[in-house]
Image (cartoon, rainbow, N blue to C red):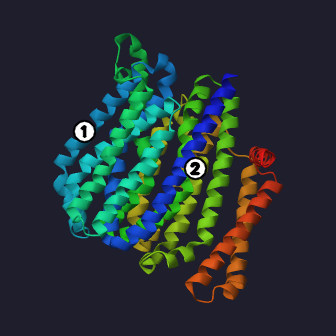
Amino acid sequence: MRCWFIMGVIARQSIKGALANYLGVAIGFVTTFFVVTRMLTTEEVGLTRVMVDAATLFACLAQLGSSSSVVRFFPHFKEGRGIFGLSLLVPLAGFLLFGLAFLLFHEQITATYVERSPLLADYLYMLPAVTLFMLYMTVFETNASVLMRITVPKMVREVGVKVMTLVAYLLYGYRVVDLDGFVWIFCGSYGIAMLLDFFYLVKIGGGLRMFRIERGSLNRDLLGQMLRYTLLMTVTILAGNVPLMSSLFLGAKTGLALTGVYTIAFYIANVVEVPYRSLGAISRPVIATAVKEGNWAEVNRLGRQVSLHQLLVSTLIFYVIWINLDALFAVIPNGADYRGGAGVVLILGLAKVLNSSLSIGTDVLNYSRYYALSLLLAAVLTVGAILLNIRLIEFWGIDGAAAATLFSYALYFLLLLSFIGWRLKVSIFSAGQLKVLAIMGAGLGLNWLWTNYVTPLIATGSMASLLTDAALKTLVLTAVVVAVTLTWRVSPTVNRMVKKTSHIQ
């Protein structure tokens, strides 16, 4: 009974979280393609991207792995007493270390960007504040997730932040504020989001007393385990944000203008990963509990289910994006400036599919007794990404930055899944995944046929004909892909959901 209740909570929160994510995607789509590309230069787009990516990376480091630690050790704390207070203190220590490093190396960091990205060098002083905001947004989201209440924090991050930054873009675009004012409002949006998450967490957690650390709620052995796990997870968490490194390298090596082109392409590809954000956040506590109880049959079952459905959804989203890419660049303002990012969309899209469908393996390892290996694997991923960025950007520019992400992920997951299969006897692979790949391969073939034989008959050169072709192609090809998926019974769960929905109607 308890299992069905938990799975019901996961389903409800996942659906609500996914809706929040897609509402955010819709707002972000309009903002990115019809406001940002119109009102900001490519250099200014690059500025916002590098600021956000740098703050996100530094916030990951400042967490000192505490977010993973909260999820893993929450079952060991009666009603969570003590662990929520620790979740505030450990990141604070990490942020103070980051602040000290930023002060000590501020001149060197500025010198790295001042030649090719002088605009970024002018606003580096805002980086610590944005890092703090993002750090505690993540902390409060994690605490909400272990309480099985992720929808509101998702709304804040995916919708609230996007609405507030949209206001910043409009104010700057219509010259209500200057560039300084825009940067302040843009960065301040994350501060407001952090406060909203905090007030919500206090509400669902029973007030500020949830952060109280009582002596009786802690024991030395448990704290020792948490400390070791937390320190080991620091690099692991950073590795999960490897794609963000590319914009930092691009800003230093190619300047903010090309980074802006990369940013738009990155956003397009990033849509692929949206479903994993909600399902991953809500499934991790269940994985942690199953691993703690040694229920490896449940770990295998849940791992295969999550991996299959993430692959199914992410490939379908990527497919729809890819077959409409030319139309998208034709529609957005100044689309010609960003068309050079098509290769980035392809490469990063594949990387996002890979990460979405296989990241459940990372959760399994992190919550097992072999979690220390995460440090080594994360180091391989991080160092590999850094080295590949340095080399590939020189040869392929922004496509090289995307390729660095894809290749480093491929190596990481090869090592990770080989290990959990060998030592934990956990496999997240199923026959359904091969079916998904076969269907998507056939779908790409259909797209090639349509583009070469149908599009010339419909798209006569006008914008209306181009959009008509894109709409018809999307409708027909997606319907074919979905029909084959259901007929082939790739996922019995999806088939049951469709059957149930049709009966309700």
Image coordinates for residue 161, horizontal then vertical, percent: 39, 51
* Extreme-right residue of the structure: 487
> Residue sitting at 76 percent across and 65 percent down?
480
Q: Nearer the viewer, mark 1 or mark 2?
A: 2
Q: Is residue 306 left or right of residue 223?
A: right
Residue highlighted by disc 1 = 97
Res. 186 visible in picture: yes
Q: Answer with the quarter of the image where residue 139 lies.
A: top left
Image coordinates for residue 109, horizontal then vertical, percent: 22, 57
In the rendered view, would you say 141 is above or below 485?
Answer: above
> Residue sitting at 41 percent across and 52 percent down?
383
* Local secondary structure at mark 2: helix
Query: Badge 1 local density, few (<14 within 10 Å), some, or many (20+)?
Result: few
Q: Is residue 59 left or right of residue 143?
A: left
Q: Is residue 89 left or right of residue 16?
A: left
Q: Is residue 191 left or right of residue 318?
A: left
Residue highlighted by disc 2 = 275
> Residue sitting at 45 percent across and 35 percent down?
142
Q: Nearer the viewer, residue 390 or 354?
A: 354
Q: Answer with the quarter of the image where residue 363 lies.
A: top right
* Extreme-bottom residue of the structure: 460
Q: Nearer the viewer, residue 33 or 363?
A: 33
Q: Amino acid at mark 2?
A: Pro
Image coordinates for residue 312, horizontal then vertical, percent: 68, 53
Q: Amino acid at mark 1?
A: Leu
In the rendered view, would you say 306 is above or below 84?
Answer: below
Image coordinates for residue 33, horizontal then vertical, percent: 45, 69
Quadrant occupied by the N terminus: top right
Using the image, tell me which numbered label, if any, was put on residue 370. Answer: none
